[in-house]
Image (spheres, grey):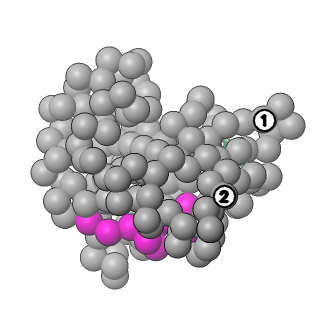
Amino acid sequence: MVAALSFVFPTPDDTMDFGRALGRALRAGDLVLLAGPLGAGKTTLTRGIADGLGVGGRVSSPTFVLARVHPAGPAGVPLVHVDAYRLGGDLSQLDDLDLDTDLERSAIVVEWGEGSAERLSDDYLVVRLDRREDDVREMTLEPHGTWADRTPDLVEMS
Ligand code: ADP
Ligand code: MG
């Protein structure tokens, strides 16, 4: 059976809930790219992921830093949250962050990184969020590499 990879989230809590399910499934080495326009819910989803992963620190949109490291909780997996919005599409600075080293021991979630961050791994999950006219959010999952096998479990869990 092919799992449906499109979802509708009427409220921020719905988006958070999916993030929690995703966060519970994350391990060191996992890369998640969040795509979609400003206000689509990428940071909201990241809050859910952080909660599901049980990491410390508040998730916000990092204005002055590109990346914020959330220390590991009981699951033992730190979360690196990257928000490349302020780079305005010039993603060359992402190379300076040495995210490939982080990825060995952390899970990484990247907002606005599509077009560059996927170079970090053959295995990554793109989560595409969009805001409908009625304000409801739509989410589509685009699994790459081993995420193709993991995504159906994730859909079942959420
Ligand atoms: P992004 O990081 O994509 O720019 P944010 O998560 O920072 O987006 O902001 C999304 C905004 O939209 C928040 O103010 C949130 O409360 C609101 N919102 C309304 N409905 C939803 C929903 N279903 N999912 C996520 N956010 C929602
Ligand atoms: Mg954001």
Which residue is at a point 59% across and 75% down the rendered structure image? 157
Quadrant (top left/top right/bottom left/bottom right) for the N terminus = bottom right
Pinpoint residue 117: horizontal percent, then vertical percent.
Answer: 30, 37
Q: Residue furthest front?
A: 1
**Element at badge 2?**
loop
Q: What is the three-letter code of the residue carrying label 1?
A: Arg
With respect to residue 42, does 1 lie above or below? Answer: below
Pinpoint residue 29: horizontal percent, then vertical percent.
Answer: 25, 60
Q: Is residue 109 left or right of residue 98?
A: right
Q: Which residue is mark 2?
A: 4
Q: What is the three-letter code of the residue carrying label 2?
A: Ala
Return the disc, 2 or 1, that comes first in the chain's sequence.
2
Pinpoint residue 143: horizontal percent, then vertical percent.
Answer: 46, 51
Q: Is residue 86 left or right of residue 95?
A: right
Can residue 65 be seen here? The reply is no
Identify the mark at residue 132; answer none if there is no mark: 1
Main SS category, magenta section: helix
Can residue 107 be seen here? The reply is yes
Q: Is residue 155 magenta?
A: no
| Label 2 – label 1 distance at C-alpha | 19 Å
Q: Is residue 20 magenta?
A: yes
Q: Is residue 111 left or right of residue 108?
A: right
Quadrant (top left/top right/bottom left/bottom right) for the C terminus = bottom right
Pinpoint residue 121: horizontal percent, then vertical percent.
Answer: 25, 47
Find the magenta span and give its range.
19-28
Depth check, front residue: 9 or 142: 142
Which residue is at a point 44% across and 58% down the rendered structure image? 148
**Element at badge 1?**
loop
With respect to residue 17, does 117 lie above or below? Answer: above
